[in-house]
Amino acid sequence: MPTLRPDPSYRKADLPWLGQIPAHWEAKRLKHVANVAFSNVDKHSHEDENSVSLCNYVDVYKNEQITFEFEFMQATASADEVRKFTLKKDDVLITKDSESWNDIAIPAYVPNDLENVLCGYHLALIRPNPNEVDGKFLFRALEAKPINYQFEVEATGITRYGIDQYAIGSTLFPLPPLPEQQAIAAYLDRQTAKIDALIAKKQRLLDLLAEQRAALITQAVTKGLPPSPNGRGDGGEVKMKNSGLAWLGQVPSHWEVDLVKRHFDIDLGKMLDMSKQPENGFLKPYLRAANIYWEGVWLDDVNEMKFTKEQLTRYRLQKGDLLVTEGGVTVGRSAIYQGELEEVYYQNSINRA
């Protein structure tokens, strides 16, 4: 078997995470080809400052491009801040902190000058040297996982992680000649647009299937099974009656409509208040709202807290218990506990029925 030789047009990049790059490319630090600045413009307004629009963390985190179409936050800034942080064509913004070390330095590109729109707090403004690097290419480079990984390993913190200006400026990335950068950026625009269009179509299909699933469940639990002349379902011809509830409408005439509390024991979980935890209690695993999904109970991230002997009896889950989240963005989400853990309890964000 012949020995395979590397393409002579490639060379080692002297960076283990990068491997080989085209021979005519360079590897440079960001600070050598662009200016990096941390914004100090926050959302607070002051009477002696200029009125401005503010591009914020969420604008960058959720969008690949920053344009005039956004509804920017209104704030104020000093004349010096306006000079330093007004967004210009080819600027790249990145998020410089996060609740997770591996969700940091998310980039967004500025395709046009944005008059009176400033880079806001929690963001870094990267302004490329136009003789060295194309802004769109730089944006795509910062999206690349091996390059972005440099930010992840430099992030510091405990409950919130951040990267400093030195770490951002010291980031290494491959740098082709400027015309090739522009060609690569244009190619990626075309190809990612095709992929995004396919994703949108798939997402629309998923949304329609989710609507169909919800409608199927609603029909079965409020109207019964469908007739089955074709062998599907076994509901037969069912007489209906008014349920007396406007949101429910008619139900099968032989059904009852009653209050849940008459048929289930309902209890609210134990309050997670560290100041009121029993000093000599029993340390046990417990479920939170974050553990409850429509598909079931997620047990890979279970915390512990202390319970008294009496609380162990009250809050211990049994196989078949129905868990319903009672607050927050997931209110109403429910799942049946299948008894996967020998001993587990639940927090006050969950109702047990």
Image (spheres, grey):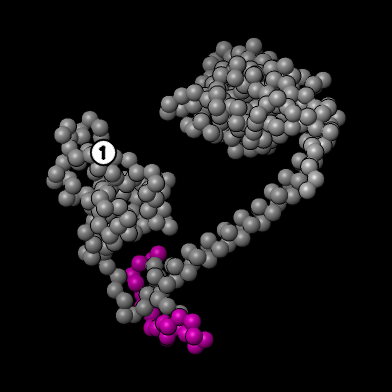
Q: Position of residue 171 (x, y in %)?
A: 65, 23
Work out whether 36 lies above or below 113. Answer: above
**Which residue in the rendered view is the most extreme toward the left?**
310
Work out whether 304 lies above or below 350. Answer: above
Left or right for 196, reference 336: right
The residue wearing badge 1 is 305
Residue in view at x 53 percent, y 61 percent: 210
Quarter of the image where one finds residue 240: bottom left
Quadrant assignment for the C terminus: bottom left
Q: Where is residue 322 in the image (x, y as percent from the top left)?
A: 31, 58
Work out whether 4 lies above or below 99. Answer: below
Residue in view at x 50 percent, y 65 percent: 213
What's the amino acid at mark 1? Met
**Which residue in the rendered view is the most extreme toward the right?**
179
Q: Nearer the viewer, residue 44 or 92?
A: 92
Q: Position of residue 60 (x, y in %)?
A: 61, 33
Q: In this view of the protein, can residue 82 be seen by the observer?
A: no
Q: Give the residues drawn in magenta, as a range.
A: 227-247
Determine the main secondary structure of the stretch shown in magenta. Answer: loop
Residue in view at x 61 percent, y 55 percent: 203
Judge the density around disc 1: few (<14), some (14-19), many (≥20) Cα neighbours within 10 Å: some
Q: Which of 321 and 229 is in front in this view?
A: 321
Q: Where is residue 63 in the image (x, y as percent from the top left)?
A: 63, 38
Left or right for 277, reference 105: left
